[in-house]
Image (cartoon, rainbow, N blue to C red):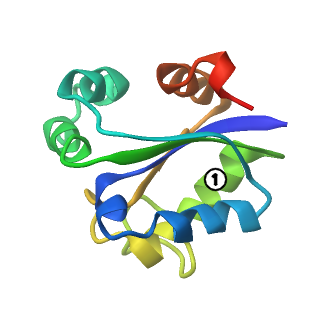
């Protein structure tokens, strides 16, 4: 049983589609093992996305992620990392397959509705960033 981190980003929270996105996960065999709604500080966003620090989009990403509250979740299930990434769709919603979360709820490559861990190793690090072991059921 794998675990992965999912973040419903500020654009999707503001559109009030949290429940619709969660339904996609649950109806596709992913269980929510932990969930919370938070507003990231700039320091937290910078620390979480440090892997992208040298990329040209880094500052825009940080500013976007602190622009409103997010919903952070630990998703659990068979092949959770891959399943979550398949459900999310391509980073650019214009390239995302129909029926994926980004195709249905994202507006742009910057405001792309969701984040998901890209590997099991990163999932462990990302989950630990937001949740202590006692908070995951």
Is residue 89 something that shows in the picture? Answer: no
Q: Position of residue 47 (x, y in %)?
A: 31, 20
Picture residue at 55% right of the left edge, 24% below the top:
131
- The answer to whether residue 41 is left or right of residue 135 is left
Picture residue at 36% right of the left edge, 26% below the top:
48
Picture residue at 63% right of the left edge, 25% below the top:
135
Q: Is mark 1 on a helix, strand or loop?
A: helix
Is 76 located above or below residue 24 in the figure?
above
Picture residue at 45% right of the left edge, 75% below the top:
103
- The answer to whether residue 69 is left or right of residue 98 is left
Crowd band around label 1 with a 10 angstrom C-alpha radius: few (<14), some (14–19), many (20+): many
Is residue 90 something that shows in the picture? Answer: yes
Nearer to the camera, 56 or 65? 65
Q: Where is residue 29 in the image (x, y as percent from the top left)?
A: 80, 59
Residue annotated with mark 1: 84
Residue at the extreme bottom of the image, as rendered = 98
Nearer to the camera, 5 or 14? 14
Q: Position of residue 45 (x, y in %)?
A: 28, 29
Q: Position of residue 3 (x, y in %)?
A: 71, 35
Is 102 located above or below residue 51 in the figure?
below
């Amino acid at each position: 049983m794998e675990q992965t981190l999912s973040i419903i980003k500020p654009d999707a929270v503001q559109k009030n589609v949290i429940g619709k996105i969660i339904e996609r996960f649950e109806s596709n065999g992913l269980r929510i093992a932990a969930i919370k709604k938070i507003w990231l500080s700039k320091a937290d966003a910078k620390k979480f996305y440090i892997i992208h620090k040298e990329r040209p989009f880094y500052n825009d990403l940080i500013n976007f992620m602190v622009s409103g509250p997010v919903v952070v979740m630990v998703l659990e299930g068979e092949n959770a990392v891959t399943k979550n990434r398949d459900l999310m769709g391509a980073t650019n919603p214009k390239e995302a397959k129909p029926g994926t979360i980004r195709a249905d709820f994202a507006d742009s490559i910057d405001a792309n509705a969701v984040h998901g861990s890209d590997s099991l190793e990163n999932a462990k690090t990302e989950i630990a960033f937001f949740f202590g072991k006692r908070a995951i059921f």
